[in-house]
Amino acid sequence: MSVPSRREDLVDLEGYHSASVDVEVRLNTNESPFPPPPAFVTALQSALAEGALNRYPDRAALELRRAIAHYEGVSVEEIFCGSGSNEVLECLLLAFGGSGRTALVFEPTYALHGHISRITQTSLTRRQRGSDFALDPTQVAKDVIEVQPSLTFLCSPNNPTGNAESNDVVHSALEAGDGLIIVDEAYGQFSSESAQELRGGENAERLVIVKTFSKTWALAGVRLGYAIGDPEVIAACEAVALPYHLSSLTQMAGILALAHVDEMDERVREITKERLRVSEAMSTMALRLWPSEANFILFKPSDRSGHDVWERLVERSVLIRDCSSWSGLEDCLRVTIGTANENDRFLKALEEVL
Ligand code: PMP
């Protein structure tokens, strides 16, 4: 007896993971270092006590989508919710990608764009960013014309490089082709730039903006993300999503989070302030640092191997992301901005190691 063979095209596929090491300071997965506001937790507990968990959740997640639509200033038909923005990306690929279709990515970028493309049998074309990682609108237009992708992924601010994409790049991609342009704004609230400004403009029916409650909203454990897009695109995502994919608990948490916007925004301001302090401290060390508009910073030690520095930080109980083996990121490391205390621990350890 043996287990049936896997899909041939996925035999070498490894699951997406980040090193899991038992340390005191975890700055490797870009989560919020702060728990959600206490008033939100209390409200969630009461909602949970009243919620009918024996029943299936609202399949259309209407109340949640209405709350998000109100927050974003769009209509409910323009919002699709998923269990984390990863599920939203998966639904977009299921609906608009697949066999015989192509997705275009600009690397280095968020690995899941390519990973889910592969799982959904969407062929993947990779273009490489330059050394400052910024995209050039003219080059992006050329790439879109050449590749004719059904989906083009932009990520702003880009994970793991931290730079925000200018709206000229998004505009240029929209003009050049006829596929979807997906702007992943998982870290959007840390940045001053958003593709939202292009909504309502020319070709905007092909623009999809994807956001998450995981980073700025301090709710990575809840698993909630959403897409803002044309009602036809949203309906196509609904059609491929599994029934009841969004649990009652997730829906409750999302609705209540939107009643605590001010406290959530305060967390974003705190992290943005800390990002500046950490960048300034790092700029005096023997490393190259890329400017960041997100809640993480990419850097490269000047005269040490990236992996070696990563290991020595782990020895000091500080875990960051080792990107040194990723294409275009030789010797690079990425640190998530934590609490002031965690950031101090990181800075002290890094100074010792370098
Ligand atoms: N997009 C980007 C760019 C990310 O970095 C992440 C998380 N690492 C996600 C999407 C997925 O976030 P989630 O599924 O938690 O919403």
Image (cartoon, rainbow, N blue to C red):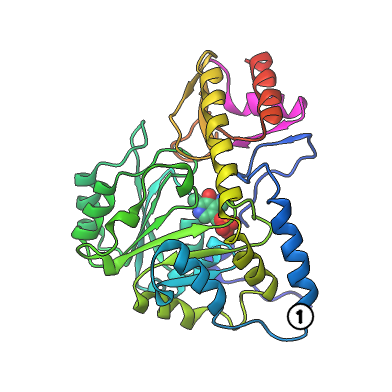
Residue drawn at the location 68% of the way across and 14% of the way down: 352
Which of the pair 212/217 is nearer the observer? 217
Residue 312 drawn in magenta: yes
Counting other residues with Cα less than 10 Å from the Cα at mark 1, is it few (<14), some (14-19), or many (20 or more)?
Answer: few
- Residue indicated by mark 1: 53
Residue 124 makes an appearance in the image = yes
* Span of residues in magenta: 303-322
The picture places residue 310, in percent across and down from the top left corner, at 65, 29
Residue drawn at the location 73% of the way across and 86% of the way down: 55
Examine the rendered structure and indicate whether residue 309 appears above or below residue 292. Answer: above
Q: Is residue 207 left or right of residue 61?
A: left
Q: Quadrant of residue 206?
A: bottom left
The picture places residue 10, in percent across and down from the top left corner, at 55, 65
Q: Amino acid at mark 1?
A: Leu
Residue 174 drawn in magenta: no
Which of the pair 77/326 is nearer the observer? 77
* Quadrant of the rendering where the N terminus is positioned: bottom right
